[in-house]
Amino acid sequence: MTSYEKLNEKVVLNVDDDSMNQMVMEKILEVAGVKTVAVRNGAAAVRKLMEGFRPDAILMDLQMPVMGGLEASQKIRKWINAEMPIIINSGDITEADREALHSLGIFDFLRKPYNQTDILDTLHKSIGIGQV
């Protein structure tokens, strides 16, 4: 069994418009002691960050109402924190999306459906605590 103890007490902003996806992600991260704060769209994520909330990483869906993940990521990089780890969490990532995200310094992607190991390994790497 892989150990994720370095993730214990980390905080993730989970940005997804689907409440079932939020719940599944919360349960998966809970296993490693990761705390989650969930919001339903990119505008809510930007607002929360502008208010001073500083998670260790952001899990960002791409397709959401109000403001999608690409636009939210652009605003986060420009206005809030150019280095905050953002992991794109989506069922559909086009090559154009990847190129736009790469230009923002976002290289970590989780494709739905995902599994616990993929999520925890990606989070571990993204927040800079090395290999599992």
Image: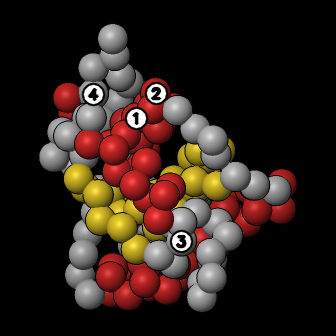
Contact flag, marks 4 and 1 (Cβ < 8 Å):
yes
Kind of residue at disc 4 = Tyr
Q: Quadrant of the N terminus?
A: top left
Query: How busy is the neighbourhood of tag 3: few (under 14 within 10 Å), some, or many (20 plus)?
Result: many
Q: Considering only order in the chain, which callout, 3 or 1, is on the residue closer to the N terminus?
A: 3
The image position of residue 117, as x and y in percent, is 46, 27
* The furthest residue to the left: 9
The image position of residue 67, as x and y in percent, is 60, 84
Kind of residue at disc 3 = Asp
> Is residue 99 among what the camera can see?
no
The image position of residue 64, as x and y in percent, is 62, 75
Query: How busy is the neighbourhood of tag 2: few (under 14 within 10 Å), some, or many (20 plus)?
Result: few
Does 121 appear above or below 83?
above
The residue pinned by badge 2 equals 117
Q: Considering only order in the chain, which callout, 2 or 3, is on the residue closer to the N terminus?
A: 3
Question: From the viewer's perspective, is 96 left or right of 102?
Answer: right
Contact flag, marks 2 and 4 (Cβ < 8 Å):
no
Question: From the viewer's perspective, is 54 left or right of 40?
Answer: left
Question: From the viewer's perspective, is 44 left or right of 6?
Answer: right
Q: Considering only order in the chain, which callout, 4 or 3, is on the residue closer to the N terminus?
A: 4
Q: Nearer the viewer, residue 58 or 65?
A: 65
Disc 3 versus disc 2: distance between alpha carbons?
A: 23 Å
Q: Considering only order in the chain, which callout, 4 or 2, is on the residue closer to the N terminus?
A: 4
The residue pinned by badge 4 equals 4
Q: Residue at x 47, y 76 (%)?
A: 40
The image position of residue 96, as x and y in percent, is 83, 62
Disc 2 versus disc 1: distance between alpha carbons?
A: 5 Å
Q: Residue at x 16, y 46 (%)?
A: 9
The residue pinned by badge 3 equals 17
Q: Residue at x 60, y 71 (%)?
A: 69
